[in-house]
Amino acid sequence: MDGAASNTDAARIDAQDASSGVVLVPQGAQSGAPPLAVDRIFTLIGARPGAKWRLLSAAVSRSHAALILNGTSVYVRDLASRTRLFVNGSVAREPELCDGDELQIGPFVFNFRQPPAGLLAAPVEAAPAAALYPANGRPPVPIVGRTLLIGRRPTCDLHIPSATVSIAHALLFELDGAHYIRDMLSRTGTHVNGAPIKQQKLNPDDHVRIGEMEFRYGSVDAAARAAAQAAIPPAVDVSKEETQPASAVERLSSSGTFADVQFDANEALHAGEEGKGGPDAPPRPQAQPTTLTIEPIVATYGYGNIALTARVESAAGPVGKGAVTFNLRHEAIDMGSSPPVPVSAGRVAVNLPLRDLAPGSYVIQAAYDPMEAADQFGPSGGGNTLTVRKAPAALRLRGLSAIYDGSPKTVSVVAEPASLQGISITYGGSPQAPTDAGRYPVVAQLDHPLYRATPVSAVLVIAKAPLALTAADQQRPASTDNPPLTGSLNGLRGGDKITAIFSTRAKLSSPPGSYEITARLSDPDGRLKNYALSYTHGTMTVTPPSEPAIADPAPDDEPTMLEAFDGRRVPDAADVLAADAQPLPASESSPWSIGCDQASFIGGVGYSADPPCAKPRRAARPTLPGERNTSVSRGGHPLPGSRPSNGDGRSTASSPPASKNGNDIPRPAEPSAGFFRRFTRLLGFSGRHGS
């Protein structure tokens, strides 16, 4: 059953006219007052506003008793009242009333009148055995008899010492073969399956919440119920025990009647909120109103304990009786309550460890209960706020310098206290740690449920990495191609793809000399910005061309023959140039004049040839001025036909006359190898064929 249905059902039950004629007839001082009709299923009797029958007396508890009309029977339940409930002069807990019984509540006495049973409804079955099972795993609380009273007063069947629970908070009672739960106008209400209720029928596995305690309603075996029944204390014999008086002049006689009780002239009887008491009843003196004051509290998490304090005062000054119960709530969550703390000289305090309270705003509620001083002081309540601030913490940045290596560079944070979670770091506004060289503003912040810290900032410096580029020196002869240009690139980090390309201005036609080797870098990914580059130039050295190697002349006995331009065989060049050349006759104008009988060479060197098919003879040359006679053979002996020199370039022997046919022309001297080399370098072998 949901809350709306339950409240509707409660209204129907409250409004139900019993039409049974069951009444309570006032006796004693209230004799002659109109009878009180038992016309509802559930009737609350007490001194509090909202009670169906409100009895204004200091000897009447705020919620004193409850009358329950259940089929053919009417039973009354004492609600842990201070002055108890009497039936026929005896203290009673849960008696069933019979016609003519005398019911005493405080100073008020009633005569119970009930018509014959035939006029009432048929009797109903008893409710099944059941219990309340605490959610915290404690033993179940069986429902013994017809009722189970729940409240903060120790004499309740289910005692819950919590400020969120009223003195008489709720009552489970039997009705029509089932169990119902009724809220007794409590401060925090009664909830069934999460919904607030006034009165509701309980079904198996329903969840009941009283204050901060939660229970499950369910069946229980007969043995457990019998054991709980045996634990109920017996009824107190009023003749042997004096009840707690409501005032100094109120005493109950041993007979249990009001005959010997003296009352103040202010007792009155009120039925409901309409005040159906006697018209001549004097007003009841009001207890002194009280005020409860709680100062706002500001504390810091983790620093010892905090004292919740309250002041209770009346118009006459500080109140020295009663007790205060504190309750703490945080964001609609009940954090628990303190046990009742006695008031002393108008003040009361309770300590709370701050480590049990997370930072935030709390609502402190306190309720003052005058308890035994209810005839002097009225109840009061108050509240305020408790603000718990976060504890201070400190942050420091570390690792603010690094060298580029291709990996992200993060900074570290040292926190006090250590091992704090919730620290965030940003680099130039981004949570991603930077990789490239540069300067980055760093900010560290703390987001922790218990601690606070001022954000700290600094600058992260990532220095450029050193990069060394070196070109290798190279060398080559002139008129040759450049060799491959190489070098080294040292210091690349993180797999950066940077390469070097070398070049020089030296070309194939460049003359001998030194040329600089330069380089340029290829950086397709733009990573060169992360390096500090140093460059060492190389040098290309172009050397002069090397002299061609000249073979030695062939031996004299194995002359090498050259092919003449006209197909004839002429003496080998080494043989021809081995001797100095003879001047040509003035009539000779051709560099070469080769015939069957003679051969002459330009430059004054010539050969005298034998007739055709004859072996040519070597001609000797005269020694030039200033030149040593070199007309010798390789073995150091004079060549055939050579003439001695006198040192001035003239021959010491006269030349024999030449014959016209050339047979007697002396053979010229053989040119030397040095002459041959000089001659070939300057002129090379070139000639023209003469006629």
Image (spheres, rainbow, N blue to C red):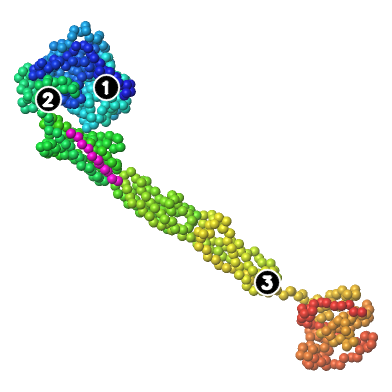
Q: Find the residue positioned furthest to the top.
A: 118
Looking at the image, tell me whether mark 2 or mark 3 is earlier in sequence order.
Answer: 2
**What residue does disc 3 label?**
510
Q: Residue at x 7, y 17 (%)?
A: 255
Q: Are marks 3 and 1 in contact (CB under 8 Å)?
A: no
Disc 2/disc 1 C-alpha distance (Å): 27 Å
Asked which secondary structure carries label 1, the reply is strand
Along the viewing direction, whichever of 232 and 542 lies nearer the viewer: 232
Say left or right for 393 vs 314. Answer: right
**What residue does disc 1 label?**
199
Which amino acid, by three-letter code, is at mark 1? Gln
**What residue does disc 2 label?**
57
Q: Main secondary structure of the magenta part?
A: strand
Disc 3/disc 1 C-alpha distance (Å): 117 Å
Q: Find the residue positioned furthest to the right.
A: 661
Which amino acid, by three-letter code, is at mark 3? Ser
* Residue 388 drawn in magenta: yes
Q: Residues within 10 Å of mark 2 (few under 14, many from 20)?
A: many
Disc 2/disc 3 C-alpha distance (Å): 132 Å
Q: Which one is closest to the eye, mark 3 or mark 1?
A: 1
Can you tell which quarter of the image residue 354 is in? top left
Q: Identify whether 521 is placed above or below 132.
A: below
Asked which secondary structure carries label 2, the reply is loop
Q: Identify whether 427 is placed above or below 500.
A: above
Where is residue 322 drawn, in percent x and y?
14, 33
Say left or right for 196 vs 38. Answer: right
Write down the region rendered in magenta: 380-390
Which quadrant of the rendered structure holds the N terminus?
top left
